[in-house]
Image (cartoon, grey):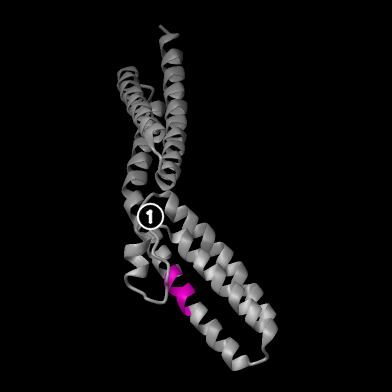
Amino acid sequence: MVQLELANLTAKLQQLKQQAEHRDLQGERSAYAKTAVLDERFSCRSDLFVDYVSELEQDLQRIDRLSQKTKDMDLLKLYCDRFVGKFAMLQAKISQLSRQQQQQSQPQQQRIQNWQRRLDQVMKAGDRSELQQKLAQQQHFEQQLQQKIAEKNQLLNRSNNKTDTARLSAEILSLKKRLGECQKTTWKLEQKLRQIESRF
């Protein structure tokens, strides 16, 4: 029974570790302020959420060793309850930050969707002057993204901090993905314009 419970907790802890790594990649470095200061159950004093998960992994290993040495179920339950309390608190903090980030990213996603809808309407209408205007705007967006990528790359090359390096790498990857989508749209606009101009 205890081994089954420990296996279940190990699986949940692995999921939490992935969430913690994702949060740390965002570069917030706020784990200490959000966790340790507010809850003395953690002895960890790191700015990285993944370090708090490591503490939980050590706690779980201690419970596992204890379960092999004693048959005192009340004592094991006490340690398990304490572990679950720490786990739940850390999970709540990480989930709260994830929700906040989703809410912050929604306006940007909405702007991109609105822009895409307007582009689709212009493409269907096939108005040459409007297409040229949208193409110019699209090329401007591309230049902005390329400039941001170059700036982030410069910061990455100067960075000696592992957390900053991971965050910058993730940001560059995200920007390159957006640039790729942007370039696809530019290509579609250019193709549409060529079709219209070939009629003249």
Which of the 4 image quadrants contains residue 6? bottom right
Rendered-image quadrant of the N terminus: bottom right
Q: Is residue 75 above or below residue 20?
A: below
Residue 171 or 160: which is nearer the viewer?
Answer: 160
Q: Measuring 63% from the left and 74% from the top, which residue is drawn there?
A: 8
Question: Is residue 88 located in the magenta-colored stretch of the structure?
Answer: yes
Q: Which residues are magenta?
A: 85-90
Q: How many marks?
A: 1
Looking at the picture, how far across and down is residue 78, in whole percent? 53, 88
The front one of 84 and 139 is 84
Res 181 visible: yes
Can the viewer see residue 1? no
61 on left or right of 179: right
The amino acid at mark 1 is Gln
Q: Is residue 32 left or right of residue 51?
A: left
Residue 170 on image: x %, y %: 45, 42
Q: What residue is shown with label 1? A: 102
Q: Is residue 83 magenta?
A: no
Q: Which of the pair 96/108 is nearer the observer?
A: 96
In this rendering, is residue 149 above or below 93?
A: above
Instruction: Please tell me whether the stretch drawn in magenta is mainly helix, strand or loop.
Output: helix
Residue 135 location in percent, x, y? Answer: 35, 22
> On the picture, is 16 further left or further right than 141?
right
Task: Report helix, strand or loop for mark 1.
Answer: helix
Q: Is residue 140 above or below residue 84?
A: above
Q: Which residue is rendered at x = 42% and y = 22% of the image? A: 189
* Nearer to the camera, 103 or 173: 173
- Name the outermost residue toward the top: 200
